[in-house]
């Protein structure tokens, strides 16, 4: 079966599954891409409770669903239900993408590529980095940061969580340096990354995981100013990013990671990258003026 195989109606089916899904922007992202490129495909939302995930994966096989984005809480439990899982997804311990390779149903993790995309060209070799949070997204971040050749890796990747416990397995597995939450402002990192839900619309929008007024100034690397990267993309500018910008840091919003991981998914499914129309649709939906 090819990635372009269709359903009986002639329309290839794709979608996103999670529990719950809420206001997922993945359908907007991918359906805009299909329409702009003239691909006869439809991307849907499938809310699947955890206990029904095995049945859902069987439905993907039976209904010839050509690809699926996978989000919380299914990324880990999905792995044993597939025919093949990429080495990267095994390394992260989670898959966020289902795709077909021949007649085998496969899993990949595009969160790593999505996270690293806006950091291309940033000289992280020998730099200090602070990672806040230890959930599934933090695992993808850690995998991306430690994957380059040894000479290109950061000097230290510090990690901290409010619980002072949940980051310890992550630190041990990926060779990170654990910090107590109360000590997170002591390093002077080139890059500070928020992977916690603090600042997310509808949950803790007025909160932040980091107080830039208490932070040691991150050392610039070459001509690169210190950076702040928030994987939260709704709202586009979180309190974390507002305060980082006021402190003189260059900011990367979660839109970059979200679009990057979606682009990598779209390439797996269609062999083409997402078109500019998809990016503009996201920006408009999130209230940003299109570029």
Image (tube, rainbow, N blue to C red):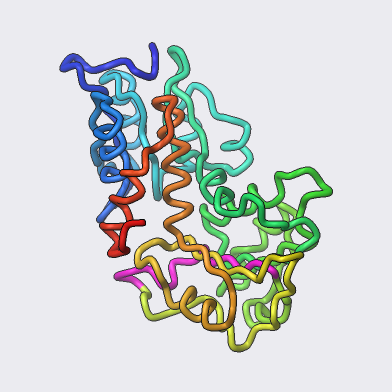
User: Looking at the picture, how far across and down is residue 260, in whole percent?
Assistant: 47, 46
Q: Is residue 200 above or below residue 5?
A: below
Q: Is residue 130 above or below residue 174?
A: below
In the picture, measured across the screen, residue 221 lies left or right of residue 90, that is: right
The residue most toward the bottom is: 213
**Which residue is depicted at the point 74% across and 74% down?**
219
The residue most toward the front is: 291
**Which residue is depicted at the point 48% across and 73% down?**
241
Depth order, front residue of 212/44: 212
Q: Quadrant of the N terminus?
A: top left
In the picture, measured across the screen, residue 178 lies left or right of residue 66, that is: right
Q: Quadrant of the C terminus?
A: bottom left
**Which residue is depicted at the point 16% across and 17% down?**
9
The segment highlighted magenta reads 190-203
Q: Main secondary structure of the magenta part?
A: loop
User: Looking at the picture, how far across and down is residue 21, in whole percent?
Assistant: 28, 51
Depth order, front residue of 22/265: 265
User: Looking at the picture, how far across and down is residue 146, in whole percent?
Assistant: 71, 49
Residue 199, magenta (yes or no): yes
Using the rendered view, name the quadrant where residue 67 is placed.
Answer: top left
Residue 119, magenta (yes or no): no
**Image mark count:** 0
Q: Is residue 7 above or below residue 181?
A: above
In the picture, measured across the screen, residue 245 lies left or right of residue 187, that is: left
User: Looking at the picture, how far across and down is residue 59, in whole percent?
Assistant: 28, 25
Depth order, front residue of 149/158: 149
The residue most toward the left is: 9
């Amino acid at each position: 079966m090819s990635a372009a195989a269709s359903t009986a109606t002639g329309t290839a089916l794709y979608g996103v599954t999670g529990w719950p899904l809420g206001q997922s922007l993945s359908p907007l992202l991918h359906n805009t891409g299909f329409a702009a490129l003239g691909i006869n495909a439809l991307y849907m939302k499938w809310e699947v409770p955890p206990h029904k995930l095995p049945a859902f994966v069987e439905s993907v096989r039976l209904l010839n669903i050509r690809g699926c984005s996978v989000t919380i809480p299914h990324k880990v439990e999905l792995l044993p239900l597939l025919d093949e899982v990429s080495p990267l997804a095994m390394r992260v311990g989670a898959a966020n993408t289902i795709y077909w390779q021949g007649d085998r149903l496969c899993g990949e993790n595009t969160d790593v590529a999505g996270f690293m995309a806006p950091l291309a060209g940033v000289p992280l070799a020998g730099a200090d980095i602070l990672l806040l949070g230890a959930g599934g997204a933090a695992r993808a971040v850690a995998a991306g940061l430690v994957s380059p050749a040894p000479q290109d890796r950061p000097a230290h990747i510090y990690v901290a969580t409010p619980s002072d416990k949940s980051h310890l397995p992550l630190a041990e597995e990926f060779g990170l340096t654990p910090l107590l939450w109360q000590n997170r402002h002591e390093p002077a990192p080139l890059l500070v990354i928020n992977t916690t839900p603090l600042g997310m619309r509808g949950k803790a929008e007025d909160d932040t995981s980091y107080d830039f007024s208490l932070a040691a100034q991150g050392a610039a690397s070459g001509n690169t100013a210190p950076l702040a990267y928030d994987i939260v993309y709704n709202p586009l500018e979180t309190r974390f990013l507002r305060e980082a910008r006021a402190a003189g840091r260059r900011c990367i919003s979660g839109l970059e990671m979200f679009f990057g991981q979606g682009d990598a998914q779209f390439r797996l499914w269609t062999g083409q990258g997402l078109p500019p129309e998809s990016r503009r649709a996201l920006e408009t939906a999130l209230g940003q003026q299109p570029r």
